[in-house]
Amino acid sequence: MKRKAFLISAALLIAMCDPGPDPDRCAISDPDKLIEITYPRGGESFRHGQDVKIQWKADTLELSSIGIQFSLNGGPWRFVYNKSLPIVPDGSEAACMEFKWTIGEEQGEYSLPDSARIRIFDYQDQQGTYDTTETFFIKAN
């Protein structure tokens, strides 16, 4: 059986999303969560080489940095970006944030995985606060 490999590259920038005319758009819907992933949520299909904006809401009063990881076909969690990403508070309790993730190319004899999940977590307390997407799909061009 072939082992599957996946190359990930990502923009080195975390950006605050514009909440637009609705200031509550960035409010986290579950009061027990400090992080809430808003995109992707699961069920989406992407192609390798495609840029995907991972989007989430974060409690800026409780979190100072986050980590983003992915899992392929139910395998181990690996970092999308192998450093913590700072959360820059804008004065509000919650912020909408995004990170550009470029889904990688096939390598040699390896083939693309067909399912993936993303999780975002409190980088300072890696055993604690996090949110995880449902399964989404990655396809060849």
Image: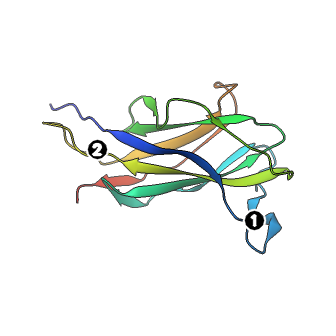
**Mark 2 or 1 closer to N-term?**
1
Q: How many marks?
A: 2
* Left or right of 13 on screen, residue 138: left
| Three-letter amino acid code of the residue under disc 2 | Pro
Q: For the residue labelled by badge 1, is the local secondary structure a helix, a strand or a loop?
A: helix
Q: Position of residue 56 (x, y in %)?
A: 64, 52
Name the residue rendered at 85%, 53% in the picture: 92
- Residue nearest the viewer, comparing 123 with 16: 16
Vertical side of 68 occupied by 99: above or below: below
**Which residue is under mark 2?**
113
Q: Is residue 44 left or right of residue 54?
A: left
Q: Badge 1 local density, few (<14 within 10 Å), some, or many (20+)?
A: some
Residue 72 x %, y %:
37, 39
Q: Position of residue 133 (x, y in %)?
A: 53, 48
Q: Position of residue 91 (x, y in %)?
A: 86, 51
Name the amino acid, label 1: Arg
Residue at the disc numbered 1:
25
Q: Residue at x 73, y 71 (%)?
A: 20
Work out whether 84 lies above or below 118.
Answer: above
Q: Quadrant of the C terminus?
A: bottom left
The 10 Å Cα crowd at callout 2, few under 14, some 14 to 19, many 20 or more, is some
On residue 90, the disc is none
Q: Nearer the viewer, residue 113 or 10?
A: 10
Local SS, label 2: loop
* For residue 125, side relative to residue 12 (left or right): right
Tell me the mark number nearer the camera, choosing from 2 and 1: 1
